[in-house]
Amino acid sequence: MDKTLFEKGLAKRKSTLGDEYVEKNLAAADDFNRPFQEAMTAWCWGFGWGDETIDAKTRSMMNLAMIGALGKMHEWEIHCRGAINNGVSVDEIRAIIHVISIYCGVPQGVECFRVARKVLEELELI
C-alpha cells in the first residue's frame, strides 16, 4: 500500500465524514477487513477524493446522486452528513433528490427524502 496515498486519503476521509466516524471504523477493523479499510482509504479517498480537479462540495453532490441511484441507503446517509460538512446546502440536497427521483424512480426519491430528513433533523438544519 502506498503510505502517502493512505495518509492523504485519511485526511480527506476525516474532513468529510468526521474524525470520530473514521477513527471508529478503523479501530473496528480486524485481520479480515483491515486490508479493505486501508485500500479503500488509499484508493477512494486518497486517489479519488485527493484529486483536486473536482472540489469536495461537487464531489459530495456527485456521490449523493450516484449512491442514491444505487439505492445504498446506509452509505447515502453517511455521505449526506459528509456533503453537509463539505458545504452542500439543504436546498441542494433537495434538488439532488429530485434528480434521483426523476432518473431512478419516485420510490428511491422517497427513500432518499426519508434518510435526508433523519440526518437534517439530527443536525437541526430543518
Image (cartoon, rainbow, N blue to C red):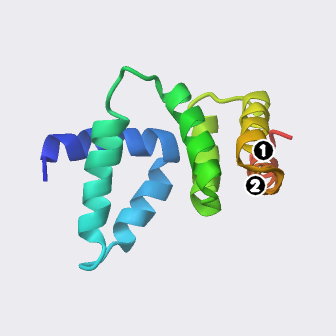
Per the image, label 2 sits on a secondary structure element best described as: helix
Residue displayed at 64% across by 58% down: 71
Quadrant of residue 11 within the rendered picture? top left
Residue 64: horizontal and vertical position, in percent? Answer: 61, 42
Q: Is residue 73 visible?
A: yes
Could you tell me residue 118's position as x and y percent?
79, 55
Quarter containing the C terminus: top right
Please state the horizontal and vertical placement of residue 8, each as a whole percent of the image: 27, 38
**Residue in the image at 31% along x and 51% along y:** 41
Q: Pointer 1: what residue?
A: 101
Classed neighbour count for the residue bearing mark 2: other residues with Cα under 10 Å, few (<14), some (14–19), many (≥20) = many
Which of the pair 101/45 is nearer the observer?
101
The residue sitting at the right extreme is: 126
- Image coordinates of residue 6 in percent, x first then y, are 23, 47
Task: Tell me how far mark 2 sits from mark 1, CA to CA.
Answer: 6 Å
Q: Amino acid at mark 2?
A: Gln
Q: Quadrant of residue 53?
A: top left
Q: Amino acid at mark 1?
A: Ser
Dot placed on the residue nearer the N-terminal end, 2 or 1: 1
Q: Is 19 situated left or right of 46 in this image?
A: right
Identity of the residue drawn at 35% across and 43% down: 45
Name the side, left or right, on which 35 lies relative to 97.
Answer: left
> Is 53 on the left or on the right of 75, as rendered?
left
Residue that carries the numbered disc 2 in the rendered image: 108
Q: Residue furthest top?
A: 53
Residue in the image at 38% along x and 36% along y? 49
Mark 2–mark 1 CB contact (< 8 Å): yes
Q: Element type at marker 1?
A: helix
Q: Nearer the viewer, residue 20 or 34?
A: 34
Q: Residue 73 sits in which quadrant?
A: bottom right
| Residue 81 in sight in this render | no
Q: In the drawing, does residue 103 fall left or right of residue 55?
A: right
